Amino acid sequence: MKILISILSFFSFVLAGAGSDSFYLTGENGEQLGPFDFKEQSSLKIGKKNFTLSKVLTEKQKIEEILASTIVPELDLATEGLEKTVDLMNKALSSGGGDIKDQVQIAVMESARSKTCRKDLAKQKNISVKEALMLITKESGTKWLIHGSRIHISSINDPDGPLMTRFLTIRSTSDLNVSPVSESGEGGDVSCRNFFAGLGVQWPEGSSVKYSTALGQLCVKNTEENLAMIEELLKLHYGQPCQIEVEVQFVEYDRADISAISTGGVVNLESLVALRSQGKGKLLYAPKVVAKPGTEATVKGVSEYIYPTDFTGETVASSSATNGTGSYTNRIVTEYLAGGVPGNFETREVGAVLSVTPVMSEGDVIDLTVVPEIVYEPVWKDYAFTYADMTGKEHKGHAEQPIFHSQRCLTSISVKNGETILIGGGMPGRDNAKMVYTFLTARMIDIKGKAVKNRPVFTVTDP
C-alpha cells in the first residue's frame, strides 16, 4: 500500500516528468516497475491490479489550478498598492494547508515595485488569485510568470527566464539583414533583431544578437524559449538544401479543336489537358532547367543562323575595246557583281530557350520570373532584282532574307510546389491551322534531384 500511496501522491501534483515519454516506479526495497507510458489513459499494472492515468498535469498546470481555486475575500487595488495586495493573495494561498499550496507564493520583482493601478479601480470581492493576477498586471503594465512554485510579477520588458548565450551558424550576413559588429563590439544587431521580431521573437531587457566575423556565427543572448524559436526559424528559413526544377511545355493543337472547346466556355488548363489526353495535342518542345532560389538559369537547344542584313554593289574596271589596226584603246566598263556583296551580318538562334529566376515564397508557393521562347526554322525569301550593266545587258541579283516565326512569353507568376499551370498561348503556330499553348510545372527538389515535400509553415500565435 505504501507504494500505491506514493504513486497516487506523485500523480496528483509533482508530475515533473509529464513531458517525458515514459517513467519507472521504485519501491521501498529498491524494486523497479516500468517503464510506463506517461500520458493520459495509459495503463500500468501493480501487483494484480491495473491502474489508468486519468489526469496528467505538469507542475505549471497544477499551480494554475491552485491559483484559480484559491479565493481572496476582498482586494482594494486602488488604495492598497501592489505589494500589500500581493501579501493578501499570499495569505490566501497559505491558508489552504497540507499540500503544494503551502509552497506557492507570489513575489513582486524590483522592476515592478514602482508600478501602480488606477485610483478609480473598484474593490474586488471573492476574486480568485489567478483573476487578481490578471487584473493587476493588466492595470499596472506588468506581467506574471510561474517559476517553479513561485509566481513573479515583473516589468513587461523583463525576460521570462534566465538569459542564455548561444552561437548559431548562418549562411551569410545578407540573409538576415545582419551587419558585422564594429571593432569595439557595438552595433550590428538592430536589423537582425527586427528580422526575428517580425516573426514573433521577443527581445526582453538584456537580450542581444551580434554577428561575429571571426567565427562566422550569430551570438544570441535570450531566454531558452526565445532561443528555441530562433533556431526553429533558422531551420525553416534555410530548410534542407533546396533547388527549383522548372519545365515548360509548348503544345500544338489543331485550330479546329480549340474552336470546338471554346464554344463551350473558356479555353483553360483542364480543357487543354483533356484534349491532349485524347491524342489531339503535339508536344513541340519541353525545355527544363534547375536553379537555386534567387538565381537566374537558362537552358537552350538551338541552331545559330547567320545572315546578312545589307547587300551592296561592287564596281570593277576592265579594258575591253580594240581598234581596227590592232592598237588598243582603254574603255572603262562598270559592272555590278551579280547579287551584290552581303554585309552587316546578324545571328538568330533557332530552337527552344528557357530563362527563369525562381524565389521561394511562403509555405509551398514558388514565385517565378520566366521567359520561355521557341523560334522555328526560318523561311527564306529571295528579294530578287534585275539590273543592267554599262553595255545594257540585264542581270538578276539575289538578296535572300530569313523570316523567323517565334513564340515568346515574359511573365512573373506564383505556382504551388509540384503543380502545373497554363501561362500563355492561343497564338498561331508556324502553320496557321495550328495553335500553341504554353504550360509550366515547378517543383522543389533536393541536391540529389528528389522531390521535396512542402515546407512547414511557422505560425506565431498572438498571446
Image: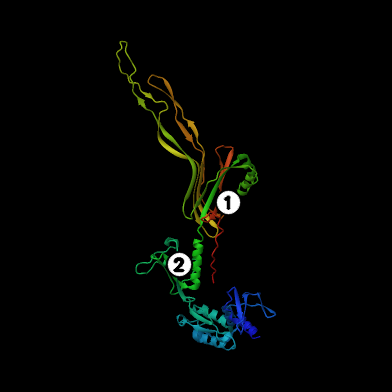
Image quadrant holding the N terminus, namely bottom right
Closer to the camera in the image, 20 or 140: 20
Where is residue 431 drawn, in percent x and y?
56, 37
The residue identified by callout 1 is: 420
Identified by mark 2, the residue type is Leu
Quadrant in which the C terminus appears? bottom right
- Is residue 152 among what the camera can see? yes
Q: Nearer the viewer, residue 118 or 51?
A: 51
Q: Position of residue 117 (x, y in %)?
A: 50, 81
Residue 57 on image: x %, y % = 60, 78
What is the residue that sits farthest to the right in this orientation? Answer: 48
Q: Mark 1: which secondary structure? A: strand
The residue positioned 42% from the left and 34% from the top of the image is 308
Mark 1–mark 2 CB contact (< 8 Å) = no
Q: Nearer the viewer, mark 1 or mark 2?
A: 2
- Residue 266 visible in this rendered orientation of the protein: no
Asked if residue 314 is positioned above or below residue 191 in the image, the reply reads above
In the structure shown, which secondary structural element does the residue marked by tag 2 occupy?
strand
Q: Residues within 10 Å of mark 2 (few under 14, many from 20)?
A: some
Instruction: Check disc 1: other Cα within 10 Å, few if <14, some if 14-19, many if 20+.
Output: some
Question: From what the image shows, is residue 117 above or below residue 247?
Answer: below
Left or right of 215 in this view: 20: right
Q: Which numbered disc flags the more N-terminal residue, 1 or 2?
A: 2
Indicate the position of residue 376 as horizontal and vertical percent values.
Answer: 52, 39
Q: Which residue is mark 2?
A: 168
Amino acid under disc 1? Thr
